[in-house]
Image (tube, rainbow, N blue to C red):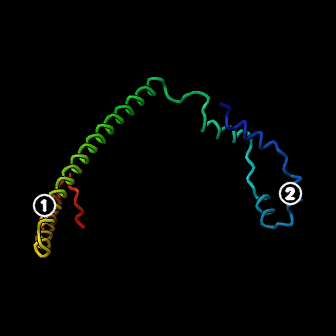
Amino acid sequence: MKLVGSRILELDSIDASPYFYELQPIKGLNTFLMNLIVRGSDELYEKSLKIQPLKPTKTPEQLEQENTTLRESLSKQTALLEKTQNDIESHLIQIQKFFAEYQDKLNSMAGEEQFNVIQEHMKDAIALCNSEESSEDSYCDSE
C-alpha cells in the first residue's frame, strides 16, 4: 500500500493557476480558491505518517497483549449475548403458552366475564412490574 502522502504530493504537483482566470467571473469561488491553505510537502508527509506509520509504534508483545484482551472481551460479550438470547427465547415460549391458554380461556367465556378477567390480568401485570421495578432483570417499563 502506498503512503497517502505520495498521492497528496501528486495532487499538489498539479498546477491549477491557469484555471483561476477562467473562474474569476464567479466571485465566491474565486475568493474561496484564493484563500486555500497550501500545505508543504513536509507537513503533508507528517500527516500521512500519522495515518500510515512506516513501522508499528507498538512492540509485538504489546500487540499480542492487545489482541488477547480483545479476544477475551469478545468471548465475554458473545457469552452474554448467547445467555440473553436464550433468556429471550425462554420468555417467548412462556408468553406463547400463556397467550394460547389465555385465548382458550377467553373463548369459553361470555363478554362481561371476559372483560373482568382481562381487567384482573392487567392489575396483576401492573403489580408484577411494580414488584420488579428495582430488579436488574426487569423487563417492565416503569414510566
Quarter of the picture holding the C terminus: bottom left
Nearer to us in this view, 112 or 20: 112
Q: Residues within 10 Å of mark 1 (few under 14, many from 20)?
A: few
Q: Is residue 142 above or below residue 10?
A: below
From the top left corner, tell me how far across and down residue 81 is, in percent: 31, 42
From the top left corner, tell me how far across and down residue 80 is, in percent: 28, 41
Mark 1 vs mark 2: in front: 1
Q: Residues within 10 Å of mark 2 (few under 14, many from 20)?
A: few
Q: Determine whether label 1 and label 2 are within 8 Å by CB.
A: no
Nearer to us in this view, 73 or 17: 73
Q: Hey, which quadrant is residue 50 in on the image?
A: top right
Q: Amino acid at mark 1?
A: Ser
Nearer to us in this view, 131 or 90: 90
From the top left corner, tell me how far across and down residue 7 is, in percent: 72, 38
Q: Please, what secondary structure does the residue beneath circle 2 have? A: helix
Which residue is found at the position 33% from the left and 38% from the top? 78
The mark nearer the N terminus, 1 or 2, is: 2
The residue at which mark 2 appears reads as 20
Q: Is residue 79 left or right of residue 1?
A: left
Q: Which mark is residue 131?
A: 1
